Amino acid sequence: MTIRATFLGTLCRPSFVVAIAAVAIFVGPTSAHKAPHTPEQLKQYEDVLMEEVRKGDLLFHGDAATAKQMGVVLSTTGMACAMCHPMASDTHPQSYPKFQVETSKFATLRDMINWCIEKPNQGEKIEIDSEAMKALEAYIAWSNSGSVLVPGKH
Amino acid sequence: MSDELDRIRREMHAVLQQPGVRPDDSLQITRRTFIHRSLLFGAASVGQTFAWWPLLNTIDVAHAAEAPFKFAWISDTHLYEKSLNTRFVDKVVRAVQEVQAMDPPADFLIFGGDLAQLGKIEELELGVDLLKDLTIKKYYIPGEHDWYLDMGKKWGELFGQPNWTFDHKGVRFIGLDTVSRGPDYWTVKKMTPEERMGHMATLDGTVAGAWAGVGRDQLDWMQKILADWDKSKPIVIFSHNPLYEYYPPWNFWVRDWREVNEVLKPYTKVTNIHGHVHQVLYNEIGSMRSIGMLATSWPWPYAPEGVPKLTKPMIRADPGDHFDGVGWETVNVNAEDKVDVEYIMWGRKEVFVQSDPDSSLSQPEKLRPRMADNMWPY
């Protein structure tokens, strides 16, 4: 009962109602999701991914203009992620989450991205849900497409 | 594996790995480990940390040297200007100190390329400055990072001809330039020298293409300088890139390895020592053996495919220790007419993996080439 009451209470918040309405407007009529996907829709989804991958690729390879545009300092030593991880090799996104030896903590890929930024690259760590983080994650995952999920593997 | 890569791999196997063809019978590999005299540098901290316990692994290669001697190899220092990166400088300083302290001293040093990171005058001059403390004779071959800002102009001014040969105590040494004959990817795209260098300096870039090669002219030169050399006498060839095909997307090869093999085939005791891969590598190709050397700057992971079966992989480096996974090498030609290549990896008691979890190869990975460097505005 407590849970339900809280949920109803949340629904009554004006800001949340506005957000739901906004999503509905963008997504379309409630029945829209029941229609088969169109090729155009699939293309849009793919485009969204590939734009993230493109930005992530540039950040990962030390592109100064992209880093500046996204307001991040991923390195101060001239090192870029790709210098130790060409083609995002040895990043092993398929092994996360896992116990991370470097931090002695159970970690996600994003945690490790930040560790690499701070330690080897001597840069400034980025917000865990920032645009730059999503882009880096997108590029690393895309580069490793087809690798088999083995969470926890060292 | 791509169809193209698969085709090349099969061809290389068919051409080079024919039944019964191996380096000279007397060239048995033995690996032994012992603690190096450079241990003395860290005498005060030996008790506390393995970091001062460089472990050496040796590959014995029989040959007919006239007298025992040793030489040293340093490569892939990838120096930025000192104001940007001091870690790379520190590691060159350490390698230079250790080579200088060798006792008995090395007869000479081979610098195996990629002195600079972006080919800048300041970077190359910094390298010269750091290496000047080494008083032994030094020989240089270029890396792609040294070359593609000004197409080797400054490198040539500092070090002269990029390929060379000399004989030393019964061994013919050859230095090759495997970097300067890349395809022209910059003219049509109207790249600035910095843009050209930027693509070349990105190992996994897709724009610079298959730049590593020996070239017909240099192959002819090599054939000429070997014409008077006894087929059973030892030859040691230095190159930045490996003289076989390991992983073309990262130019871990020379594209004309077939022609290289044609020139070297008659000679039974050929050893190729190369940089560029920043990792421990060992392979036998026909009658040639090939040994990959460590960088001082940073280690590359093994490529997702194509690692030679004869390679015992090096340990997965600790990214939190910039002295780990890197180092330099001595090559010791001893009284029994053998060559020992000794990996001096800082920060490790064990250079080679002892079990799967120590290896970057323990996690199979499928990788795609990058995509953004071929898109606007590139």
Image (cartoon, rainbow, N blue to C red):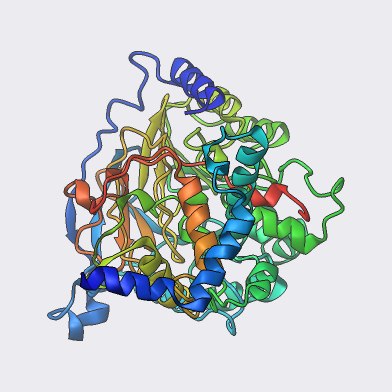
Q: Position of residue A30 (x, y in %)?
A: 54, 48
Q: Please, is residue B314 above or below residue B51 in the view?
A: above
Q: Which residue is drawn at 27% across and 44% down?
A: B362
Q: Please, is residue B50 above or below residue B212 in the view?
A: below
| Left or right: A133, with B205 as reference point | left
Q: Residue at x 52, y 64 (%)?
A: A20
Q: Which residue is drawn at 72% across and 60% down?
A: B156
Q: Please, is residue A87 above or below residue A107 in the view?
A: above
| Left or right: A71, with A121 as reference point | right
Furthest toward the left, the residue is: B47
Q: Position of residue B119 (x, y in %)?
A: 68, 65
**Would residue B129 be visible to someone looking at this image?**
yes
Q: Where is residue B341 in the image (x, y as percent from the top left)?
A: 33, 50
Q: Residue at x 53, y 31 (%)?
A: B229
Q: Nearer the viewer, residue B159 or A36?
A: A36
Q: Nearer the viewer, residue B80 or B290?
A: B80
Q: Splitting the image into 4 quarters, where does residue B41 fall?
A: bottom left
